[in-house]
Amino acid sequence: MAQGVLALAEQFEGRFRNVAYEVLSEGKRLADALGEPLAGVVLGSGIEAMAAELGKYGADKILAADDPALADYTTDAYTNVLFDIVKDHDPKILLLGASTRGKDLSARLSARLDTGLAMDCLALRVDGDTLIATRPMFGGKVLAEIAIQGTPQMAAIRPNVMEVVEAEKGAGVEKVPVNVGVAKTKALEKKTEAAAKVDLTEANIIVSGGRGMGSPDFSLLEKLAEVLGGTVGASRSAVDEGWRPHSDQVGQTGKVVSPNLYIACGISGAIQHLAGMGTSKYIVGINKDPEAPIFKKADYGIVEDLFKVVPALTADVKKLRE
Amino acid sequence: MDIVVLLKQVPDTETLIQIAADKTSIKTEDVKWVINPYDEFAVEEALRIKEAQGEGKVTILTVGPERAIEAIRTALAMGADEGVLIDDPAAEGGDALGTAKVLAAALREIPYDLIVAGQRAVDDDYYQVPAAVAAFLGIAQVSMVIKEEIQDEKILCERTIEGGTMVVEAQLPALFTTQKGINEPRYASLPGIMKAKKKPLAKKTLADLGINPSEVGEAGAKCRVMSLSFPPERSPGKIIEGETPEAKAAELVRLLREEAKVI
């Protein structure tokens, strides 16, 4: 009979992603609610040593699928290996992170296992034996409560939302057999963006620019983001103008983000943009137009020319940091 | 090369979403229905591949109610060759796996070398249907593709990952999903719209596809929407007053540090 929680800790090039700790911590909370154990699992190449770290987050057991064939993420190999692990360990709940790879993997795996999966979850709870997820739909305009059925009940959690809690267990790492099966896909080449930019979905602070920027010159925002330790985003208008790459777009047809601090500069606040950043903990709006819809959502608003306010903000934050 | 595009009709992203009385669905009156924006990229990419290859057929495959014909006709007006709509009440109200099972069954009757779909539908935001279709058909999938190139029996795809991209090679037949940036979808021309009216558009039911209705739609759903709600309203915060832009900036930094404690 299915038992416990299995949590996939996503690593990339030998480092756990933040969402890995969030998945483990949430897994621990659910395992405690069920009164059942938590197992952490890591897939990759040369990851056996790093896997031990998962004991810090309450894993009773740590599984490592360590094989050169898992060095780069490919859908087939990762799905096949995780499928075997699930069949062997028969967890009641399987948790993953809803990163770009996590979404790809969890979707394929849920079909292979023919089991229910809730994607991009903001909150999870167990009601008796049923896992219930709260997840956004319509780009965040609506929240849905979803009851998940099947074995295991699968949920992929949105990065940057759930709390990381340490709970030392000191569990040992157990290597699991790896059979990557027939690979129909092959990873050839990785291209990373300049200065290994933090992805918007994982950023703690986002400084976003919209039509009010007036040109592709986002250097003022880059500077503010730099002193804040944040990342630059953009509205759909700014992306459609060709001022910023598509990977920077925040909103219903771009990335849905939930940083601690979202600073919207020259963004009026179209409904599809507000939906995409509405779960940010704090929102700041800077816009010349006092009627801009962004001010209805912003915790703090400044009605002013962004080209005057942003440099002053950068200077003030810089002073704080010194 | 025969290409099938998985297409969904969704509410326009500028639509104000209202929750229906049953609390588990949305009000469909006053909704402007459009092709899922990511699926428009998929239609465009399929047409470009066909044009580059100089032969083949682009088929639009949709699960949805009668009104979805409008979305299929738009894709046909863009240049796709044929449409298939699976319209069956028993296919509605289900989860991503149910929809994928219906699509996979339909794909067993349509010849294809390549399947293209949007990376997600902007209504349910499940991100699951294309991957599940590929899994049920046992073919390769590549998600979030911004560039592709067909090479003999393979397709090279540049897909987005956190902080960059990765080039992935997949054996055909394969499925890939389109991400914004892959192309600029064309508009349907007037002659295109006229021609689209005469293009074949087949309607099918679950019985036509040999699907047991209890396995899909609401009856077969493994994920059930128990309730829908609106996210907590953010109350408008304070507008920061000050004599100069510098004074306002200084006050904001103080509030972010002392009140919000986020910097």
Image (tube, grey):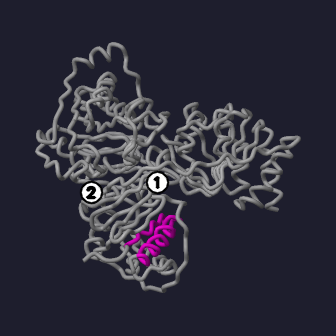
**Comes first in the chain, label 1 or label 2:** 2
Residue at 37% x, 48% y: name it.
Answer: B24
The kind of residue tagged 1 is Lys
The one of A239 and A148 positioned closer to us in this rendering: A148
Tell me if residue A9 is in the magenta stretch.
Answer: yes
Picture disc at residue A111: 2
Q: What residue is shown with label 1?
A: A190
Q: Quadrant of the C terminus of chain A?
A: bottom right
Q: Are marks 1 and 2 on the same chain?
A: yes
Check disc 1 and report its element: helix, strand or loop: strand
Q: Which residues are magenta?
A: A6-33
Q: Looking at the picture, which amino acid does disc 2 mark?
A: Ala
Picture coordinates of residue A95 (x, y %)? 40, 66
The answer to which of A322 and A45 lies nearer the viewer is: A322
Q: Position of residue B11 (x, y in %)?
A: 41, 35
On the question of residue A44 being in view, the answer is: no
Residue A46 is situated, as x and y percent measured from the top left of the image, at 43, 74
Looking at the rendered image, the disc whose residue lies closer to the viewer, 1 or 2, is 2
Q: Position of residue B179 (x, y in %)?
A: 43, 42
